[in-house]
Image (tube, coloured by chain):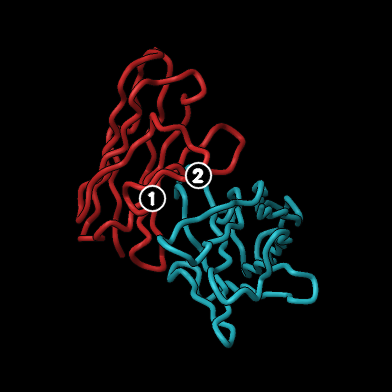
Chain colours: A red, B cyan
Amino acid sequence: DIQMTQSPSSLSASVGDRVTITCRASQSISSYLNWYQQKPGKAPKVLIYGASNLQSGVPSRFSGSGSGTDFTLIISSLQPEDFATYYCQQSYSALGTFGGGTKVEIK
Amino acid sequence: QVQLQQSGPGLVKPSQTLSLTCVISGDTVSSNSGSWNWIRQSPSRGLEWLGRTYYKSKWYNDYAVSVKSRITINPDTSKNQFSLQLSSVTPEDTAVYYCARDPGSGWPRFDPWGQGTLVTVSS
């Protein structure tokens, strides 16, 4: 199985900050990497697919990059509605394994 | 706009079978592109993909190894829905269960998701 490791597991940031979350795959997954945002009590929502493609309706302050085993999600200027937990997910194999999540909290 | 609406009991006794249904609107379960998935989330296991069903001239299923001996996912074309059955449940199966679509066009991804159902396994 492909393992997905996210870091950090949590971070504190202020509105307006630039936030970077990383995700590493245990083997090469090309660009088959998605990012999701989850708020308490809600289902995850896709933000980025194919490592760098912005899902329709998602603000442009979200961006993704990387290929192979190392990937990054960047929020260029954190907004109040962005405080949530973020997950990466590999879609290279049918199992679609997820990372452990990064909780973004208010500083 | 595709929407998924889940239903099913929130409490299941140990050793019994967990059954959930996901009703699809805005798409069809027998679409030749995409797949229909079940995913669960618990504090101990995180987000865990359980399995999927999809149609490409005939029906196919894929299941996670961790639940393969206990899981069945069935499409119901007459009601445009798909279901999850997980047998011989234990407290370890307590989780929020989600249904989700992989659109099947372009990059694979789960979009949209159902609203989630908290299933507690307890006597």
B8 left or right, relative to B63: right
Percent x, y of residue A63: 34, 37
Percent x, y of residue B105: 47, 65
Of B93 and A18, nearer the camera is A18
Alpha-carbon distance for marks 1 and 2? 14 Å
Q: Give the residue displayed 54% in from the left and 53% down from the top.
A: B111
Q: Is residue A98 above or below residue A45?
A: below
Which residue type carries mark 2?
Answer: Ser
Q: Is residue B67 above or below residue A76?
A: below
Which residue type carries mark 1?
Answer: Asn
Q: Is residue A45 above or below residue B113?
A: above
Find disc 2 in the rendering and name its residue.
Answer: A56
Find disc 1 in the rendering and name its residue.
Answer: A34
**At numbered mark 1, what does the secondary structure look like: helix, strand or loop?**
strand
A103 left or right, relative to B35: left
B94 left or right, relative to A95: right
Q: Are marks 1 and 2 on the same chain?
A: yes
